[in-house]
Structure formats: structure tokens, C-alpha cells
Image (cartoon, coloured by chain):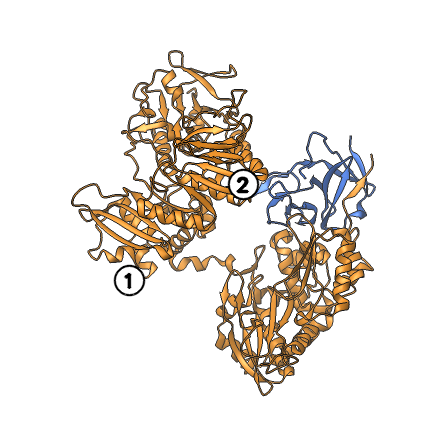
């Protein structure tokens, strides 16, 4: 069941923020074109806070060591790491995310 | 035609590499591939375990083939599933867990395991290896050692070979006292001779490792857990943990069980095929070829290629002829290269030798009939590439033997690369030859990065990366410069900086998103290009710049420097390193109130409050009530000073006053790279102004020398004297003009020391001092506009610029 996160306006366009959903930290991103993506909160490489990373419409750059990941699939680009991703959507300016409990918080 | 079944027993570096080679020859269409591995992981680079132990790399970084790779290539992997037996009659393998797989072709690549010499007390009461005793062979060993080292006071490594030394080095980084016990009379007997082995011992002891030579361990003491060692002679050594690194033994039992000929390892023919069964191949450390068993990675790559050529039919005559052993390595920070034999073997063998114990330099070569048959280089391995090649190719050596050890008026690099034969190996880890790099360049890969990606050269231990780059450049000739993207300011817009500036001005683009929309390929934004564009737009538009915070790196969004744990640092402004008791007290109170874990003086003569949570930043800034120090940004950072004229007996100029003036003027100016400045009250240069981006040094009579392009970080360069001026105001004016010229012309992240060498000092003088281009007034005006537009970003504490700008993780209730 998708979980209601709250208004999209909590995340400025082009940035990310960390949310804690039922004890699980996730990084939520809001692209400039209005897309919303959810990934695990911390980089599998060295634990960088991914929500502080730079994004464009398709990718995310970890702020600590510049590892690049696909926002949609979590796949590492040019690296062997991968992120857990969660289905996210926006309805009436409210963000909904389906956080699967099977994923362990990487922190 | 139906596909054959290829079963690979062993998922280490040899097994996985052999499968890669098979796939590279179209093997996916010929075989259904199944792999069995004893360890529950994908395939990793075992050589890098020592880096994991040292904390240089994380275990996640040493995977060669993550689990996805197997799926993508249609390989069935049974990880954590060791094979127990092979039934050759019915061509089946069975795992310990009872899994059965049929094969048409079987590859055994079970590698080897840590050799644990017979000792009493090795096992605890439960019959398992005693708590606190470790091998050093797998990721699990590494994890165990790291966990145990954290609580250990004293660790002992048994074994003075390469592996033992690596283990000792790793343990040192975990803060425990380290002893190394070795059976022989000198260290690394496989690679060194007695004299160099003893030199290495001294070096290691200086680093804090206690070495015990000629000690035979008889017993591991302790009931449940290790408490010490007892040697054959009765002496004891107390310790909390033991790492056994006494060599390796091939895992050849599986072959013996199947009735294959096993001597030291499973015996193979020149096709890497068992001498008993033409459907079974063996590669890696569990294979014995012509009486040799190899424990290094380079022979394994050669064997994998021969196997793949043969089994796929790509080359039915493919044959392995043995490998010549040459290694280049770094032990405890000591550079070492070793090849072939370490002592002369024949009466006529000629020894060329140089030894300088004081510097830890040792060079010894063994020459037979004018060819190199052995060598040791320690401390200085600058000749290693040439010598290893001469050893491998058996090329005749120059008559002047001295030139083998030292560069005597060396020929330039190009000549060496010209002379390098096409078959010479550039990357020993991955077996990539000069010719292979040439073919890759010819196929259109024209940057070192692209060639490394395609050939894997430089992707093993990494020590040959620089050489790979040189060889690529050599093959490219002048062409390498034709790769235009190296000149682009950002990778997503095909324009060099001057053209990009012209386009931005012409179209009036004032935000990063506007630049992407107008100039990037397909108008597509690119995350990695954002900060560089933001920096440029600020420089071009000043107050008119349309600030989009998502275009800036996190440091510039929250005005602090991000740390490894996601916290930030707070550095208030402190021009010239001058503060007051009142400021110090405020800083101290803030550090106490916010429980700041680290208070550190910086290299820039300031105070750094480190480890601050993002949500504490605004409160701390308010309580400090000092301006931001910009210590997070690619910008003007600070201006250091010495004590100047107020108290110093030698001071010729008011360096503290000038530093304050400079900081007041230029604080917060964005720039392509950081700008660190300093002023010195006299040429004694106590504030090290000659190695800063811009430095002003007082020489008396109100005159100042201005140095530019200095550096004392990862790169060290003494700055060049741009000019000598009279009066502090003139220092500020020329400093500002130089920095503006740099801001407009440097590449992103190009520091002044690189910039000044690229532009040339004469050019800098002409433009900045002599106004050869007639732009001095424009540069001054641009700098004035820039300084006028700077605002203290810490004032955002009152009014955050974006939603949840400084928020802690935001809780969501179900």
C-alpha cells in the first residue's frame, strides 16, 4: 500500500530530502519537471546522505564521492553499487511512496 | 546445435576470469554455464583484501563481478555452495548440500586456501579454530580480523612473506601493537635476498612492527581464546589475536577424489586440461603446469585465455608455456619490484648490485649470457618497467650495466615507448599488451579512460595507470588533442569556456536551468555539470544571477563543508587569523551548547567546528554572530597573515592590517577553484605567502611583492612574483584584478597553480600589470560589481532560502 508522505512542496524542485517512514529512512527527490523518486537514504559505498546529492531528470550524484545512480532504477552508472528504489507518485500535490519493509535501512 | 554444459567449480578470480574469456569468444552461444562458489558472494579481487584490511577500500569496492553480472550473462551461480565430488563416469558434480549438475566440460578453479602449519592448541574446546586465530584469505577472514583488532591490545602475524607483511600493515591501521613471527632468517624470501630482507625489516621496525625472525611456532596458548604463542625453543609471546599468513595450499582434493593426477596441484597439459580427462580443465592456483604452481595473478590470466581459446575452438592450438614471475608491489609503504631468481645459480651468473641502507634503497640484478634472469629493486623502482620488460622478453641488455640501475642522462619517455615491443605487457594484472592498447586506440577509443574501460588495463592493482595513459597518448600521437570534449567547460555542452561565455551573454541566460534548456544537447539537464555552470553564471551576472539552489553542491546549499558522516563544519570568518577573547568565548560557548565533537585549528588560521548536524547550523550561526568564513566553497576562502609590524621585531609591513583589508574586500567571491591568500610582513615568510594562490610579501618602504600560483597542498609549487607594488591599496587592486582574470579564464576546479602554468607568467604580467589587452579597467569594474553582490549566506538562518533547507530527516507517521 502506498504511504502518504505529505505535500510535494516540502521538497524544492531539483532537490531531495530525507524522510523517515515508519522507522525506515528514505531519500525523496523532486525533479525540476515535477517527477518524484524515492531511493534508500544512504549511499551503499560509504554512507553518503543521498538526499544532499545533485540530481537532474534521470540521475543522482552522491555528495561524498560522486557515485552516480539512476533515479528510476537505482542502478549504479559507472559503478557496481545499486540503490533500493521505492515506487513514488504525486496525486493532488501529495507525495505517495510504497516503502517495502523487506529493504533494510542502509544506515 | 544444442548447447553444451560448462560447469565451473570455483568462483574466484580464476574461475570468473576464465568464464569472461569464454564469453568474449562467443561462448554464450556454445555453452550453458553453471558456476559453483564456496563463498556466498559474487567474484571479488582477492589482491585488494589488504586494502580492505587497511581501510583504504571498502569490501563493496573490490567486487569484479557483482551478482547481477551472472544473471546478465545467463550464468547460473550457486554461491556459498562448495562442490564435494566429481563423478567422471556419469559427468556430474555434487555439492556438499546435495545439488547435482551434469557437465560436458568441467573447469576446476578452486584456487587455494590459507596454509595453517601444524601447531598444538590450534583448535578450541569445541574442535573449531580457536577464537582469535585467523587466516587471511577471504572477505570473511578480513571482517573477522578487523572486528577482533578493534578490541585487541597485541596482535601477532605468523609468516614473513608478502601476505604476512600485508596483514601486519593492515593491523597497524587498527591501533593494535603488531608483532610478526617468521620462520626464516629474512623477510619475503620469495622476492628478496638476505640483505634486502634485512633492510626491509629495519624499515618495518621503524614503522612500529616488532619482527621475530627464525622463530618456529609450536603452540597457540589459551583455553577458549588465544592468549599467546609458544615457540619450539620454549620462549613465549603473549597476544590477543593471531593471523596466520604462512602461505597457501592448492585446493586440489577435489581432483584427487576424482582420480585425477595430483602432485603439488592438479596436473595439466599445455591446453590447461587435466592429463587424465579431456573433458576437465584446470586453471589458477590449483593447477600444476610443467611442475610449476603459480600463486600470482598474471599467470592466471594467461591460463584463462588459453583455456577459453581451446574450449571454444577459437584457437584449437592455444597452448600455455608457463609464466615468468615478475611483480611490482608496495609493502608497508616500500616500493618493491622483484623478478625471477634472487640469488645467482651458475658460476658465470653476473651480479650487478647497489645498496644504500640509510635510504632503504637496494638494487640487484642477475645477468646470464647478457640477459636478465633475476632482479630485486627496493626503495627506488624507477627502472622497474624497463627491467621487467627486458626480463620478460629476454632482450639483450646494454653493455653499460650501470645504466640498468640508474638513469644516466635518460632518453626521453617517447624513445622508450618507441622502443617498447608491441608484445610488451603494459598492465601485468590484466595482461594487456602495448599492441592491445594500440588496437583499442585504433578502434576509436582515444582517451585513457575509454581504453582502460575497454581493455581493463590499469583496473587491477592500478600501479600502471600512468603508463597506460602514456601509451594511449603515444598511440594517439597528435590525435589525442583532437578529442574536443577535454576542452569543454562542462561535458553536456560542447563549448569551451570563452565560447560558452559568449553564448550565455548573447542569449542572456541567467540561471543554470536556462543554460541547459538553451545550450545542452536536447536541452537535457546534467546533474554533474550544475555546480560548474552556477559558478560561471555568478561570475558573469553577479547580482543579476538567478540563484537556483538545486544547481549548487550541498556545501553551497547549506553553507558548510559536508563531512564523511553527512555532518557539516562551521568556520567563522577570522581575517589574518586574528581574533579576540570575546569571539573565542562565544565560539567556546557555541561548541559546548551544541556538543560539537571536534574543534580544530585550520590551515587557514581559523577555527573549525566539525561534526555539526545540518539542523543545528542556523542556531549555531546565530549564537556565533560572526560572518561566514566560506570554508566550504569554491570561492575566496581566507587571507592568512603573520604578526606584521605591531609586535614583530622584523616586520616591514602591516600584514595583519592588509589581510583584514583583503578579506573585507573579497570575502565570498565565487571562483573556479578555491582562492587561499596570505600576507607576510617580511620575506621570512612565516605565513607562507609564497605558496598561496595570491600572496603579498612586504619588502620595506611600503613596498610589497605579489606572488601568484603558489600551492602547498597535494601539489607543491612556489608562487611566481607577478609584480612589486607600492602601498596596500595597490596590493588590493592588483590582487583583485588577477583574481578576476582567473575567474573569467580558468576551467572549473583549475587552481591558480595550474592556471598560471597554462597561461604563462609573462601573459599574466602583460594582462594584469601592463594592461596589454586594455581590459584592466574592465577587470577591476567586474571585480567591484562582484564584491558588491556578495551577501553573508549565514543570514539565511533568519530566512531559509528553500523549504526544509536545514531540516533533520522528516518523520512521516503511518
Q: Quadrant of the N terminus of chain B?
A: top left
Query: CA separation, marks 2 and 1?
Result: 41 Å
Chain at tag 1: B
| The disc label shown at residue B408, or none | 1
Given the current orientation, which residue lies at the most extreme front position? B234
Residue B572 in view here = yes
Mark 2 is surrounded, within 10 Å at the Cα level, by few (under 14), some (14 to 19) or many (20 or more) other residues, namely some
Q: Residue at x 61, y 67 (%)?
A: B675
* Chain ID of residue with mark 2: B
Image x and y of residue B724, in percent = 55, 83
Residue at coordinates 51% horizontally, 20% vertically from top-left? B127
**Which chain is assigned orange?**
B
- Residue B528, x across and y down, in percent: 61, 53
The residue at which mark 2 appears reads as B61
Crowding at dot 1, Cα within 10 Å, few <14 / some 14-19 / many 20+, comes out as few
Q: Colour of chain A?
A: blue
Amino acid at each position: 500500500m502506498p504511504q502518504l508522505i505529505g505535500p510535494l512542496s516540502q521538497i524544492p524542485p531539483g532537490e531531495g530530502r530525507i524522510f523517515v517512514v515508519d522507522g525506515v529512512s528514505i531519500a525523496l527527490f523532486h525533479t525540476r519537471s515535477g517527477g518524484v523518486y524515492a531511493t534508500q537514504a544512504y549511499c551503499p559505498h560509504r554512507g553518503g546522505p543521498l538526499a544532499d546529492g545533485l540530481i537532474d531528470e534521470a540521475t543522482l550524484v552522491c555528495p561524498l564521492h560522486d557515485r552516480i545512480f539512476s533515479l528510476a532504477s537505482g542502478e549504479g552508472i559507472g559503478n557496481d553499487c545499486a540503490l533500493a528504489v521505492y515506487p513514488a507518485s504525486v496525486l493532488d500535490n501529495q507525495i505517495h511512496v510504497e516503502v517495502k519493509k523487506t529493504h533494510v535501512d542502509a544506515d | 546445435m544444442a548447447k553444451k554444459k560448462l560447469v565451473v567449480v570455483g568462483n574466484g578470480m580464476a574461475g570468473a576470469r576464465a568464464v569472461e574469456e569464454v564469453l568474449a569468444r562467443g561462448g554464450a552461444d556454445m555453452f550453458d554455464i553453471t558456476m559453483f562458489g564456496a563463498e556466498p558472494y559474487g567474484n571479488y579481487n582477492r589482491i585488494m583484501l589488504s586494502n580492505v584490511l587497511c581501510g583504504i577500500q571498502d569490501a563493496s569496492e573490490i567486487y569484479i563481478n557483482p551478482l547481477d553480472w551472472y544473471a546478465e550473462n545467463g550464468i547460473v551461480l550457486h554461491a556459498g555452495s562448495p562442490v564435494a565430488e566429481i563423478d567422471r563416469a556419469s559427468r556430474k558434480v555434487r555439492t556438499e548440500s546435495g545439488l547435482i549438475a551434469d557437465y560436458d566440460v568441467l573447469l576446476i578453479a578452486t584456487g587455494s586456501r590459507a596454509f595453517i602449519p601444524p601447531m598444538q592448541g590450534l583448535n578450541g574446546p569445541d574442535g573449531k579454530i580457536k577464537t582469535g586465530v585467523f587466516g587471511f584469505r577471504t572477505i570473511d577472514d578480513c571482517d573477522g580480523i578487523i572486528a577482533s583488532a578493534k578490541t585487541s591490545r597485541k596482535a601477532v602475524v605468523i609468516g614473513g612473506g608478502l601476505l604476512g607483511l600485508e596483514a601486519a600493515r593492515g593491523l597497524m591501521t587498527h591501533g593494535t601493537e603488531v608483532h610478526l613471527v617468521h620462520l626464516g632468517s629474512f623477510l619475503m624470501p620469495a622476492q628478496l635476498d638476505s640483505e634486502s630482507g634485512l633492510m626491509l625489516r629495519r624499515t618495518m621496525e621503524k614503522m612500529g612492527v616488532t619482527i621475530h625472525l627464525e622463530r618456529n611456532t609450536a603452540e597457540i596458548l589459551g583455553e577458549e581464546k588465544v592468549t599467546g604463542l609458544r615457540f619450539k625453543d620454549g620462549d613465549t609471546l603473549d597476544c590477543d589475536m593471531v593471523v596466520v599468513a604462512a602461505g597457501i595450499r592448492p585446493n586440489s582434493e577435489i581432483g584427487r577424489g576424482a582420480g585425477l593426477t595430483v602432485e603439488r596441484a592438479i596436473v595439466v597439459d599445455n591446453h590447461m586440461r587435466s592429463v587424465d580427462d579431456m573433458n576437465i580443465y584446470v586453471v589458477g592456483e590449483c593447477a600444476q603446469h610443467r611442475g610449476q604452481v603459480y600463486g600470482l595473478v598474471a599467470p592466471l590470466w594467461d591460463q584463462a585465455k588459453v583455456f577459453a581459446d581451446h574450449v571454444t575452438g577459437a584457437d584449437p592450438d592455444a597452448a600455455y608455456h608457463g609464466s615468468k614471475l615478475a611483480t611490482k608491489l608496495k609493502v608497508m609503504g616500500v616500493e618493491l619490484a622483484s623478478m625471477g631468481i634472487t640469488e645467482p645459480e651458475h658460476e658465470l651468473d653476473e651480479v650487478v648490485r647497489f645498496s644504500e641502507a640509510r635510504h632503504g634503497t637496494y638494487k640487484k640484478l642477475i645477468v646470464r649470457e647478457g640477459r636478465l634472469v633475476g632482479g630485486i629493486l627496493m626503495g627506488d623502482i624507477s627502472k622497474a618497467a624497463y627491467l621487467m620488460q627486458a626480463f620478460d622478453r629476454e632482450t639483450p641488455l646494454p653493455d653499460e650495466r650501470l645504466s640498468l640501475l640508474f638513469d644516466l642522462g635518460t632518453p626521453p619517455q617517447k624513445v622508450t615507448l618507441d622502443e617498447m615491443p608491441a608484445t610488451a605487457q603494459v598492465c601485468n594484472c590484466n595482461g594487456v599488451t602495448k599492441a592491445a592498447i594500440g588496437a583499442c586506440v585504433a578502434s576509436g577509443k582515444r582517451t585513457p579512460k575509454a581504453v582502460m574501460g575497454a581493455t581493463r588495463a590499469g583496473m587491477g592493482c592500478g600501479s600502471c595507470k600512468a603508463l597506460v595513459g602514456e601509451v594511449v597518448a603515444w598511440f594517439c600521437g597528435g590525435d589525442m588533442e583532437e578529442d574536443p570534449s577535454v576542452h569543454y567547460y562542462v561535458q553536456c555542452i560542447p563549448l569551451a569556456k570563452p565560447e560558452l561565455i559568449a553564448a550565455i551573454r548573447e542569449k542572456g541566460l541567467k540561471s543554470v536551468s536556462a543554460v541547459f534548456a538553451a545550450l545542452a544537447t536536447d536541452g537535457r539537464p546534467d546533474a554533474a555539470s550544475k555546480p560548474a555552470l552556477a559558478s560561471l553564471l555568478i561570475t558573469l551576472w553577479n547580482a543579476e544571477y538567478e540563484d537556483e539552489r538545486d544547481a549548487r553542491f550541498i556545501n553551497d546549499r547549506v553553507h558548510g563543508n559536508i563531512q564523511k558522516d553527512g555532518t557539516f563544519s562551521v568556520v567563522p570568518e577570522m581575517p589574518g587569523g586574528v581574533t579576540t577573547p570575546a569571539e573565542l568565548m562565544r565560539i567556546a560557548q557555541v561548541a559546548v551548547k551544541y556538543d560539537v565533537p571536534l574543534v580544530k585549528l585550520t590551515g587557514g588560521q581559523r577555527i573549525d567546528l566539525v561534526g555539526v548536524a545540518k539542523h543545528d547550523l542556523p542556531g549555531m550561526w546565530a549564537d556565533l554572530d560572526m560572518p561566514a568564513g566560506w570554508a566550504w566553497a569554491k570561492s575566496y576562502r581566507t587571507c592568512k597573515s603573520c604578526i606584521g609590524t605591531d609586535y614583530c621585531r622584523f616586520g616591514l609591513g602591516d600584514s595583519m592590517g592588509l589581510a583584514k583589508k583583503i578579506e573585507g574586500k573579497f570575502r565570498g567571491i565565487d571562483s573556479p577553484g578555491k582562492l587561499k591568500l596570505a600576507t607576510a610582513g617580511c620575506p621570512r615568510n612565516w605565513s607562507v605567502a609564497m605558496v598561496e594562490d595570491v600572496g603579498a610579501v612586504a619588502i620595506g618602504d611600503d613596498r610589497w611583492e605579489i606572488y601568484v600560483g603558489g600551492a602547498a597542498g597535494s601539489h607543491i609549487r612556489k608562487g611566481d612574483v607577478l609584480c612589486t607594488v607600492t602601498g596596500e591599496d595597490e596590493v588590493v587592486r592588483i590582487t583583485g584584478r588577477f583574481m578576476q582574470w582567473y575567474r573569467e579564464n580558468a576551467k572549473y576546479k583549475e587552481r591558480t597553480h595550474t592556471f598560471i602554468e597554462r597561461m604563462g607568467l609573462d601573459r599574466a604580467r602583460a594582462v594584469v600589470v601592463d594592461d596589454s589587452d586594455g581590459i584592466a579597467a574592465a577587470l577591476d569594474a567586474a571585480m567591484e560589481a562582484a564584491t558588491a553582490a556578495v551577501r553573508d549566506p549565514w543570514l539565511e538562518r533568519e530566512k531559509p532560502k528553500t523549504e526544509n533547507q536545514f531540516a533533520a530527516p522528516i518523520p512521516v507517521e503511518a
